[in-house]
């Protein structure tokens, strides 16, 4: 009873801490999970390859919830390895949860797929578990493990489904999803920021700006939305807005990602006025790491 799966990291369009409405987009960095189930085991033991002494409560809870729901409560082991840095604002927890739940489904011999393309369509009868069902289970595990304030359904759907998603994180409702094709540049400074430690009261103080960002996102103006988001939440969370300002004239959109500290700039490749090389030159003067990648619209998958 073994399974493997991979899920995407993501960048932020709208931080959900202010109003509960959030938006994010999948990027081409992955977290992979391997699950081995043992019907005789009474517990789940987890390992995170990059940080062997890291807290594994989230991935262990994902396996337990998945086997309780779709299996017979099997225990076993789970191991993740990732290209997504931990506590950097690139949705490492959502990617780990999604990959782990899908790998557990794979180990249980379940077929994972999607609901119909149109609202109201029934799921394919050949599908045992939809990706949205798996996503919601991972969000529940994240809440129970205490790694998120909002439940991060926006981050989780972008990681699971790809593209840009807009969500209501209070009701775990997917409000919209669209594909995007952007080049992406990520600057990650050396420090780390944990979502569960974010100052929620400070974020709620920019709720009016968050409402504006939500309106832009629901109108399909994602890049503008993320730029407004980045300025508002950099101020609310105490991050320097200078990296975003350096990128604005050369990128389609730029934002602090999640609760930081990473800053993500995107460029529409059809826009001749964008040049992420110029942004990279500016950001390369800062301590930390740069990553060039792209958006992805396919989402998480069983391997």
Image (cartoon, rainbow, N blue to C red):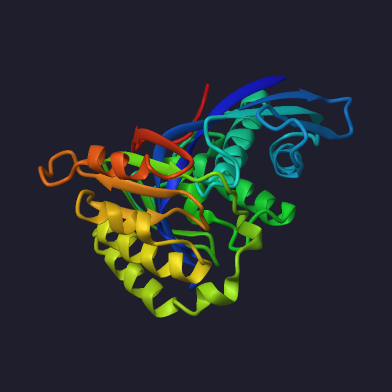
> What residue sits 58% from the left and 50% below the top?
136
Residue 179 visible from this viewpoint: no
Q: Position of residue 190 (x, y in %)?
A: 55, 44
Residue 85 visible from this viewpoint: yes
Q: Position of residue 122 (x, y in %)?
A: 43, 46
Q: Nearer the viewer, residue 220 or 172?
A: 220
Residue projecting furthest to the left: 272
**Total number of numbered discs in the rendering:** 0
Asked if residue 134 lies left or right of residue 40, the reply is left
Q: Position of residue 263 (x, y in %)?
A: 41, 50
The image quarter in which residue 40 lies:
top right
> What residue sits 58% from the left and 77% below the top?
201
> What residue sits 60% from the left and 58% below the top?
151
Q: Nearer the viewer, residue 234 or 181?
A: 234
**Quarter of the N terminus within the rendering:** top right
Asked if residue 117 lies left or right of residue 220, the reply is right
> What residue sits 52% from the left and 30% below the top?
83
Q: Position of residue 74 (x, y in %)?
A: 80, 31
- 27 relative to 107, above or below: below
- 160 relative to 195, above or below: above
The image quarter in which residue 135 lies:
top right
Residue projecting furthest to the front: 285
């Amino acid at each position: 009873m073994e399974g493997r799966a991979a899920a995407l990291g993501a960048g932020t369009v709208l931080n959900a801490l202010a109003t509960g409405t959030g938006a994010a987009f999948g990027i081409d960095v992955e977290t992979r999970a391997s699950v081995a189930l043992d019907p005789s085991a009474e517990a789940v033991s987890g390992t995170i390859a990059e940080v062997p002494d890291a807290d594994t409560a989230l991935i262990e809870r994902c396996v337990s919830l998945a086997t309780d729901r779709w299996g017979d409560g099997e225990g076993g082991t789970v191991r993740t390895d990732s290209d997504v840095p931990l506590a950097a604002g690139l949705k490492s927890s959502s990617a780990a949860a999604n990959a782990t739940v899908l790998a557990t489904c794979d180990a249980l011999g379940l077929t994972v797929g999607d609901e119909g393309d149109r609202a109201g369509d029934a799921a394919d009868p050949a599908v045992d578990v939809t990706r949205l069902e798996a996503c919601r289970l991972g969000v529940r595990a994240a809440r129970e493990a205490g790694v998120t304030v909002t439940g991060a359904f926006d981050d989780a759907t972008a990681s699971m489904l790809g593209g840009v998603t807009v969500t209501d994180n209070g009701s775990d409702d997917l409000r919209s999803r669209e594909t995007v094709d952007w080049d992406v540049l990520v600057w990650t400074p050396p420090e780390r920021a944990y979502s569960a430690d974010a100052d929620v009261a400070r974020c709620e103080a920019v709720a009016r700006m968050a409402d504006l960002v939500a309106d832009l996102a629901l109108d399909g103006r994602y890049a503008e939305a993320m730029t407004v988001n980045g300025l508002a939440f950099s101020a609310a969370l105490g991050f320097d807005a200078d990296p975003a300002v350096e990128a604005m004239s050369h990128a389609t959109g730029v934002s602090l990602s999640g609760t930081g500290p990473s800053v993500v700039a995107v460029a529409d490749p059809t826009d001749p006025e964008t040049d992420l090389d110029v942004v990279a030159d500016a950001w390369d003067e800062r301590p930390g790491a740069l990553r060039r990648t792209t958006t992805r619209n396919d989402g998480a998958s069983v391997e």
